[in-house]
Structure formats: C-alpha cells, structure tokens
Amino acid sequence: MQPIHDVDVLLLLTTAMAAKRRPAELIEIMAAIDLVQGNIPSEDKLSDSLVRLGTAGLLVQVENRVGLTATAEGLIKLLPRKGEYDQRLFELRGLLGAFQPVGEASPVSVAPAELRTAMLAHRSAASTTAKNLLMPKPKPEESQPRPGQRQRKPMPKARKRAV
C-alpha cells in the first residue's frame, strides 16, 4: 500500500479502537481520534483516507458505519497491547508499509459533510458533562493511604494465668 499517509495510520488505529464488536459510527471514530491525537484532521483528509483504506481492503462500510476487515484486524493484533499511542502508530505505519493489497476492494465513501457533522457532534458532546468512555481513567500520582486507616498499636501479649 503506497504511499502511506499519517492520516491513514491514525484512522486505521482509531477505527480499531472504536469498532470493537461492531462497525463504528463516525462520531465514535472522531472521539477515538481526539483521544489518540488531541486534534481531528480536516474532513477532506479523513474522506480521502477512508477511500484509500477501503480500496486497499482494510476498511469496510456497513450502512453508515465503518468497520475493519479480517486483514486489518490481523494487522492490529500484531501491535503491542501495552504500548503508548505514539508507539502503536509507529508500529502500525511499519506494518502498513509492508502490507501488499491482494486486489482492489470497494472504497468506503463518506462525504466530507457527514464527517464535519460527526466532528461537530463530538465537540458539542465533549463540552457537556457526559463521560467519554474512550478516555482512560486518571491514575493517581502516588498511592495515598485510605482515610481512616491508621497504624494501630499491636495487641499486648497474652499473660499466662497462674492456676
């Protein structure tokens, strides 16, 4: 698959994150992109990337949802599970560089207007107090003792009674 764009790698990883058990909606993909990169690329770049990944046989469109093919799932399984997002993107870029599509598949055609609508919906949802389930839980910096749990004095040794 030549050439490989940064948006292609980002879109494939975030689609894998958003489409765990079923094809993902566009707003779910936008939330995953926001989580991984912090900003969302333009809708034209995303639309072109969807077409490229679809014709390479890595993404498939089911109604208004986008999912991974079996080939793409195989690439994602080769990535390190515990790695940071930057490391996973780097590894996936290398795997896509070595990937040779078997034939041309049907492209995933999503209009830039639909992507723009999903971006705006994600931004409006992010400004509310609702939880984004894709966001990782914050980890405490240091383990703090629980309140009310203090060190207790040991019990005195039992005295032997004289009988």
Image (tube, helix red, strand yellow):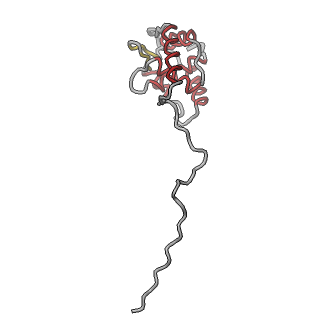
Quadrant of the rendered image containing residue 97: top right
Q: Nearer the viewer, residue 44 or 1?
A: 44
Q: Residue at x 45, y 21 (%)?
A: 71
* Rendered location of residue 89, percent (x, y): 58, 26
Q: Is residue 153 above or below residue 1?
A: below
Q: Nearer the viewer, residue 145 or 5?
A: 145
The C terminus: image quadrant: bottom left
Q: Is residue 158 above or below residue 110?
A: below
The N terminus: image quadrant: top right
Q: Nearer the viewer, residue 34 or 24?
A: 34
* Rendered location of residue 17, percent (x, y): 48, 26
Q: Nearer the viewer, residue 145 or 25?
A: 145
State the count of labels: 0
Q: Is residue 122 above or below residue 135?
A: above
* Residue situated furthest bottom in the rendering: 163
* Rendered location of residue 4, percent (x, y): 59, 16
Q: Residue at x 61, y 18 (%)?
A: 6
* Rendered location of residue 138, percent (x, y): 55, 38
